[in-house]
Amino acid sequence: MTHKYRAKPIYYDLLKNEQLTRNEVDFYKDNYPSYYRDEIAFFASTFEFNVYQALLSKFSKSWIKLQHPVEIIGKGICYPKGKIWLADFAIVNPSSNFLIAIVEAKGVLTKDFVLTLASLESMQPQLFQKVHLVFSDVIPTQNQVIKRLFRSSHRDKILTLSELQAKSICS
């Protein structure tokens, strides 16, 4: 659970479909730890929450996985535990457990994330093809990696929030 630079985190009750105050979150955490673990979602920013809402308009809640672990590098000497990226969302068919898409809400594009993306492309190309990047309102094509992706067959997987709201990510 990381807070993003100058972002307002949101706690959301997935069962009641409502935002929670910090006091309510602490109450559940202290008094109902299993409910807190299973039903309270943390969104690092309002933008990430808005992407979740857009995904909910397209998929049932049971299809959307939050903070989905994606293995970039398997266990080895250099990385005894492997290297895992926690993608913001994954779209997974609950009956077959088939991964349909990985969705990352990018309010700010960091060098660390660009390296993660490049590593995923190199080490797990089949998973890389499932990645969708969602930016708030402008796609940062001044970044060389994003510019290259934007000019490639990956173009349809780089979206603004309004584009995500308007079209399917599974086509």
Image: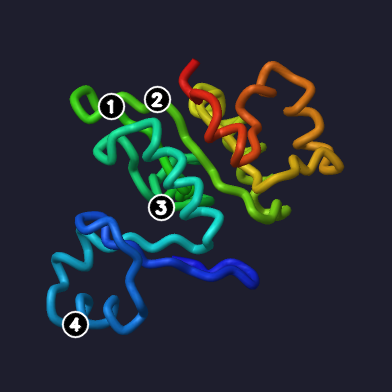
Would you call the spot at circle 3 few (<14 residues within 10 Å), some (14-19), or many (20 or more)? Answer: few
Label located before the other in sequence (3 or 1): 3
Q: Position of residue 40 (x, y in %)?
A: 27, 63
The reply to whether residue 171 is in sight is: yes
Residue in the foreground of this view, choosing between 30 and 16: 16
Quadrant hosting residue 149: top right
Label located before the other in sequence (2 or 1): 1
Would you call the spot at circle 4 few (<14 residues within 10 Å), some (14-19), or many (20 or more)? Answer: few
Separation of marks 4 and 1 at Cα, in angstroms: 33 Å
Label located before the other in sequence (2 or 3): 3
The reply to whether residue 84 is in sight is: no
Q: Position of residue 30 (x, y in %)?
A: 19, 82
Separation of marks 3 and 1 at Cα, in angstroms: 27 Å
Quadrant hosting residue 19: bottom left
Can you identify the residue that label 2 sits on? Answer: 100
SS category of the residue bearing label 1: strand
Q: Which mark is residue 81?
A: 3
Amino acid type at mark 2: Ile
Q: Position of residue 135 (x, y in %)?
A: 65, 44
Would you call the spot at circle 1 few (<14 residues within 10 Å), some (14-19), or many (20 or more)? Answer: some
SS category of the residue bearing label 4: helix
Q: Position of residue 127 (x, y in %)?
A: 49, 28
Q: Residue visible at 45% across and 45% down?
A: 76
Q: Residue visible at 67% across and 54% down?
A: 112
Whether label 2 touches label 1, CB < 8 Å: yes
Label located before the other in sequence (4 or 2): 4
SS category of the residue bearing label 2: strand
In this view, which residue lies farthest toward the right? 142
- Which marked residue is nearer to the observer: mark 3 or mark 1? 1
Would you call the spot at circle 2 few (<14 residues within 10 Å), some (14-19), or many (20 or more)? Answer: some
Can you identify the residue that label 1 sits on? Answer: 93
